Amino acid sequence: MKKPFVTAQKLQQITAEFPTPFHLYDEKGIRANARRLRQAFAWNPGFKEYFAVKATPNPVILQILQEEGCGVDCATLTELMLADAVGFAGEEIMFSANMTPFEDFSLAYELGAIINLDDITDLEYFSRLPAVPKKVCLRYNPGGDFRISNEIMDTPAEAKYGLTRPQLTEAVRKLLEMGVEEFGIHAFLASNTLTEQYYPALAKLLFSVVAELAEETGANFTFVNLSGGIGIPYRPEEKPVDIMVVGEGVRKAFEEVLTPVGLGHIAIFAELGRYMLGPYGHLIATAIREKRIHKDYIGLDACAANLMRPAMYGAYHHITVAGKEENPHDHKYDVTGGLCENNDKFAVDRMLPKIEIGDIVVIHDTGAHGFSMGYNYNGKLRSAEILLREDGSAQLIRRAETPQDYFATLNLPLKSGLA
Ligand SMILES: *Cc1c(COP(=O)(O)O)cnc(C)c1O
């Protein structure tokens, strides 16, 4: 059974102080998980996780991860600004963007970030900068299907990212001429994977390409970036990834492919987002309406604007009714928000305990790609973010939006004087 990381009693305390809806994060869980990841890759002295900022772009969360030895992976100007504001600098920042505006590229350069090139035409940007960085990463797109033991994981041929294999060789040769001294390679070939084979399979592919490129061009490769993609068990019947098994699988591929060709110095990098934060966030909401028509509906004070994944991907998010964990799950509900969009449903035909108006509802696994995918459709406002600290206290780490925030980009005097 999936249990919230916070007790019903604790939630009572927190919701007495902070009105729902809000995203709640678990500092203890975040730190313990980050330490497990480091332990799984302790065999590789250069290992570093660059947390994908887009998953949870909150400075307090980023700071916790920084304290646990992580860097950040940014894709845009504002993500770079956020990283800078938190105190990440130089090679603690990976810049993995695509269709990149020059302005963003230029800030990444100024911050000393490791720039991960997404396209052969990105090379042109280097000639517009004051100098060419000494260390550059290249994003690889192998095309075709990406398979693990004959199962199709995804179809890189349809993905907009990265350089083709011939373009990699061409880019490395040109970058060598431009004075680049250190190279790395990156690929992101499957998302939310629960198989422990994903990283090892990807690593083997990238290690082989690095060995080939080093041989072809003489370039000095110093890291391989396995990017994101390790999944989390959203459904109660799913099993979490054993990260120790993943680390060991990558080590085996390393020993098999890189060590024999004298590339045993290569550092392993990751850009995990979901795996780092997903399970350590809950969307906390209150049941505000019940409606019985052709189906039974529970309406929450949260909506898809606070958590887009169910509406966008039909994603499953587990739901616990706080304090009713042990009650019989004998009521079938659609649990919805109030957007004028019928896909605004956190759950469809979900068996839950009988819900009363005022019950606190916990939506699980919202720590990554939750708050951050929020939007303002229907004039709905983004919620607060709250951190459950290791000492049990609750800290507001982002206030909720107000109507003034919604109107801030307009010059709009309100006439009624009501707000
Ligand atoms: C989104 C993203 C990640 C993180 O992906 P997860 O599925 O959250 O692990 C890492 N790297 C890049 C380039 C991304 O776009």
Image (cartoon, helix red, strand yellow):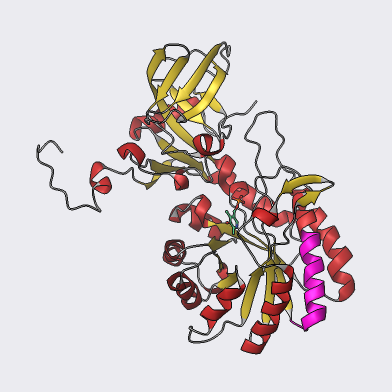
User: Which image quadrant: the N terminus?
Assistant: top right
Residue 183 seen from this side: yes
Residue 247 found in image quarter: bottom right
8 or 348: which is nearer to us? Answer: 348
Magenta stretch encompasses residue 213? yes
411 or 89: which is nearer to us? Answer: 411
The residue at 64%/64% (across/down) is: 162
User: Which image quadrant: the C terminus?
Assistant: top left
Residue 231 rendering spot, x and y as whole percentages: 66, 44
The residue at 52%/26% (across/down) is: 347
Q: In which quarter of the image is ligand 1?
A: bottom right
Residue 288 rendering spot, x and y as whole percentages: 36, 21
The residue at 79%/78% (across/down) is: 214
Residue 296 horizontal side relative to residue 197, left or right: left
28 or 37: which is nearer to us? Answer: 37
Magenta-highlighted stretch: main secondary structure?
A: helix
The magenta segment: 203-219
Residue 339 rendering spot, x and y as whole percentages: 38, 31
